[in-house]
Image (cartoon, rainbow, N blue to C red):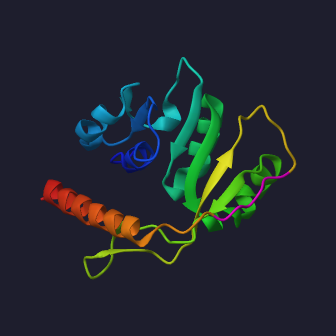
């Protein structure tokens, strides 16, 4: 769940969602608890067991463990949506899985801002990103679709950059 950015962004355009969240870092607990009335677990999502099937598993997983997160998500939710680098498609190691379980892919026309750049300002990296969306694992299909998303308005990008800068300052203060 990170710092809850995806939850807050979703809540800004849709109400009535009861979120459950899982986050590895204990330091995020205070910020996440009010966002997750369905429950908050602190620990490795890959090792969690759940008594319920969720409607959706939504994440921006660390790229190095994204495949594990996807597979766990598909076991515990009807739909899985992951924000990943578009080059997630480009891997011999993932090719068989992606062919067997093809996601719908929604490329972002604007690179997202996740952190501060070398100059200490919110910036982007050199990667293109997309939402990868899988139906429940029981649904078998031969292909997914690719549908580019609309551009994010400049004022929304600017507000997000401000949030990233504030979050980076908080993280720095916690580390000191």
- Could you say where residue 87 lies in the image, as x and y percent from the top left? 64, 68
Quick check: 153 left or right of 69? left
**Quadrant location of the C terminus?**
bottom left
Q: Residue at x 73, y 35 (%)?
A: 137
Residue found 19% across the figure and 63% down from its top: 169
Looking at the picture, tell me which residue is in the foreground, 101 or 131: 131
Specify the segment rendered in magenta: 143-148
Residue 36 is left or right of residue 55, and the answer is: left
The residue nearer to you, when weighing 7 against 152, is 152
Q: Quadrant of residue 130?
A: bottom right
Main structural element of the magenta stretch: helix, strand or loop?
loop
User: Which residue is found at the position 74% from the left and 61% from the top?
Assistant: 146
Does the magenta run of residues contain 147?
yes
| Quarter of the image that includes the N terminus | top left
Residue 164's place in the image compared with 58, above or below, is below
**Residue found farthest to the bottom:** 119
């Amino acid at each position: 769940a990170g710092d809850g950015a995806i939850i807050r962004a979703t809540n800004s355009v849709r109400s009535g969602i009861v979120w459950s969240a899982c986050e590895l870092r204990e330091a995020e607990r205070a910020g996440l608890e009010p966002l997750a009335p369905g429950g908050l677990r602190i620990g490795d999502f890959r090792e969690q067991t759940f008594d319920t099937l969720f409607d959706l598993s939504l994440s921006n997983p660390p790229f190095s463990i994204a495949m594990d997160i996807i597979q766990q998500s598909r076991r515990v939710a009807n739909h899985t949506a992951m924000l990943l680098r578009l080059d997630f498609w480009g891997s011999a190691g993932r090719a068989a899985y992606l062919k067997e379980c093809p996601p719908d892919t929604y490329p972002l026309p604007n690179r997202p801002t996740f952190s501060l750049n070398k100059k200490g300002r919110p910036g982007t990296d050199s990667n293109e990103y997309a939402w990868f969306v899988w139906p429940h694992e029981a649904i078998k299909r031969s292909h997914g679709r690719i549908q580019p998303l609309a551009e994010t308005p400049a004022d929304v990008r600017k507000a997000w950059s401000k949030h990233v800068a504030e979050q980076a300052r908080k993280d720095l203060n916690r580390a000191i």
